[in-house]
């Protein structure tokens, strides 16, 4: 990129959120944008997670864009390689390659209140943008716990999302740390080839059968010739999950039947009562993510597998010591310990209108208006922001809802005209967050008796959406200008030089470019509605 490139929109990340934003921008007639990607290719989490057995736990026809249906999914639950290929296909079909800036990691984004733009420093150069759409995703930066002694471990160490394909696990003694969605896929994939596999399990997951099968050629052909059949399939998958939401969000006691089915699933595969006791959770199903696998429990019963029902506490040379005193000699450690979700590293790199980073603004917990806009960060939006995650359906549904909101954001900027920015009002953000957290109180994620990655350091659930995808789509269909301050670049003063657009007096430090435009007869923050409707 050129040294002083300026674009209308800068999109950060090229996973589902970033590519979806790029497609939607083109559909809105916006072509002056770039997609900044730190890696050498598109795909986001489906590029980074290439571990053995990696696959999606959402049905294929629901885990794809509604505007880019894929009639050729090979399985009902697709593997990582098929999803990444789909994202490459979307990139090509919608002509996104010219907008990509690969190997361009964002180092810092700073709001310029004078020019009403974002100055962006990347690993490949600098640029500026009127609007930033951050689509880095919550599952992009691996979290490896700070285990005493890990620096002196003589063997191989890597995270599941940074799999070392050059390291051969065959015949090795391997430790798997963690029992999340990645671990239950890795364990059965590597168990047959390793000499010994030790699973360090701090908290056992609830595991349900994975109803996966190959999609026949006849089905795929039907979807190609009659696209409405694929749409109907997607609709059924969506509807079933919408009906399930009430149990997660309002009536967790109704999950008891699902819990009994999960227990039976375990009992069929695990006959040893001692092992079954280790693998039985002590919290309500749904409190942590429900996992799907037909191979996980059988793998744990194999002679070369040990289950340590305790977290890893320290490392002494090649010896791993659990909190319960159990030990294991290993050659390699694989961490399946999740990601920086409630403390996303990108937040440290975004500097808003008051000189604070987004991380500083979110010290008390993440919050954003309709999951997209943070107060004090004008013309900055996030895809898959606070409280937009799901516990039982496809995140693509939520992403597309946020793309609707982004599209209307862009339209409103166009209607306002000139050098203008929208900054979420603190009161609007607080009101939205209060309502979300009030609804969260009775959900299974808050009442189920577990500690999960849905919760932040203060124990607040700032990750999951406590409702249906239909409710969220309704809430993000249109941008309400009453929830935003309208900012205009300071105009020239009669005597020369830049100044404010009224005579309200001197600005307070850090406020330049932040005060909304005022016109007689307009309500603060709504003055542009009079313009648009004139």
Image (spheres, rainbow, N blue to C red):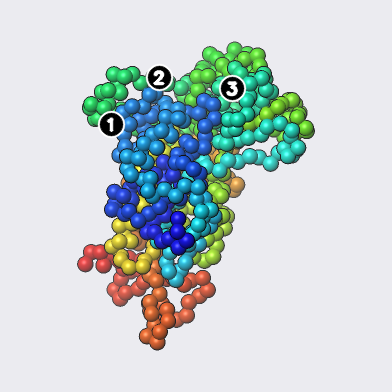
Which quarter of the picture shows residue 90?
Answer: top left
Mark 2 neighbour density, 10 Å: few (under 14) some (14–19) many (20 or more): few
- Direction front: furthest residue: 2
> Where residue 32 appears, x then y in whole percent?
35, 56
First in sequence: mark 3 vs mark 1: 3
Reply above or below: 232 against 273.
below
Label 3 vs label 1: CA separation? 36 Å
| Residue drawn 36% across the image and 45% down it | 96
First in sequence: mark 3 vs mark 2: 3
**Quarter of the figure with the N terminus:** bottom left
Which residue is labeled 3 in the image?
A: 190
- Say whether residue 99 is left or right of residue 137: left
Mark 3 neighbour density, 10 Å: few (under 14) some (14–19) many (20 or more): some
Q: Is residue 372 visible?
A: no
Q: Nearer the viewer, mark 3 or mark 1?
A: 3
Which residue is labeled 1 in the image?
A: 231
Which residue is labeled 2 in the image?
A: 213
> Where residue 135 appears, x then y in whole percent?
45, 48
First in sequence: mark 1 vs mark 2: 2
As helix, strand or loop, the secondary structure at mark 2 comes to loop
Reply above or below: 293 against 514.
above
């Amino acid at each position: 990129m050129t040294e002083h490139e300026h674009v209308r929109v800068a999109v950060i990340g090229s996973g589902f959120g970033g590519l979806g934003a790029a497609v939607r921008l083109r559909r809105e007639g916006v072509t002056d944008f770039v997609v900044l990607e730190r890696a050498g290719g598109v795909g986001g989490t489906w590029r980074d997670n290439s571990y053995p057995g990696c696959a999606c736990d959402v049905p294929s026809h629901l885990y794809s864009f509604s505007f880019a249906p894929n009639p050729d999914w090979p399985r009902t639950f697709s593997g990582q390689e098929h999803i990444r290929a789909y994202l490459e296909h979307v990139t090509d079909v919608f002509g996104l390659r010219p907008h990509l800036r690969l190997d361009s990691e964002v180092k810092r984004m700073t709001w310029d209140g004078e020019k009403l733009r974002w100055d962006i420093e990347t690993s490949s150069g600098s640029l500026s943008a009127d609007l930033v759409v951050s689509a880095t995703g919550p599952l992009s930066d691996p979290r490896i716990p700070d285990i005493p002694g890990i620096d002196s471990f003589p063997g191989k160490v890597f995270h599941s999302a940074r799999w070392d394909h050059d390291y051969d696990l065959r015949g090795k003694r391997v430790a798997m740390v963690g029992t999340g969605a990645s671990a239950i896929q890795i364990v059965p994939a590597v168990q047959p080839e390793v000499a010994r596999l030790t699973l360090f399990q701090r908290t056992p997951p609830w595991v349900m059968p994975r109803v996966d099968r190959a999609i026949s050629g006849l089905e795929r052909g039907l979807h190609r010739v009659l696209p409405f059949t694929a749409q109907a399939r997607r609709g059924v998958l969506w509807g079933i999950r919408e009906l399930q939401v009430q149990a997660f969000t309002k009536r967790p006691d109704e999950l008891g039947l699902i819990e009994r089915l999960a227990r039976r699933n375990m009992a069929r595969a695990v006959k040893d009562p001692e092992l079954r006791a280790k693998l039985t959770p002590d919290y309500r199903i749904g409190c942590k993510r429900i996992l799907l696998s037909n191979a996980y429990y059988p793998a744990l019963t194999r002679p070369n597998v040990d289950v340590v029902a305790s977290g890893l506490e320290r490392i002494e040379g090649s010896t791993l010591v659990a909190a319960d005193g159990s030990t294991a000699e290993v050659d390699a450690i694989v961490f399946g310990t999740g990601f920086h979700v409630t403390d996303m590293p990108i937040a440290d790199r975004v500097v808003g209108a008051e000189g604070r980073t987004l991380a500083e603004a979110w010290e008390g917990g993440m919050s954003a208006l309709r999951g997209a806009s943070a107060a004090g960060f004008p013309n900055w939006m996030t895809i898959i922001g606070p409280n937009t995650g799901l516990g039982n359906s496809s995140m693509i549904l939520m992403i597309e809802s946020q793309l609707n909101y982004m599209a209307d954001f862009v339209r409103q900027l166009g209607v306002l005209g000139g050098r203008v920015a929208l900054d979420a009002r603190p009161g609007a953000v607080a009101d939205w967050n209060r309502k979300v957290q009030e609804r969260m109180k009775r959900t299974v994620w808050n009442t189920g008796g577990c500690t999960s990655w849905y919760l932040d350091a203060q124990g607040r659930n700032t990750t999951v959406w406590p409702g249906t995808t239909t409710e969220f789509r309704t809430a993000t269909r249109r941008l309400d200008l009453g929830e935003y301050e309208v900012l205009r670049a300071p105009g020239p003063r009669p005597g020369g030089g830049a100044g404010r657009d009224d005579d309200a007096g001197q600005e307070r430090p850090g406020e330049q470019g932040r005060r909304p435009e005022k016109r007689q007869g307009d309500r603060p923050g709504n003055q542009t509605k009079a313009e648009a409707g004139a």
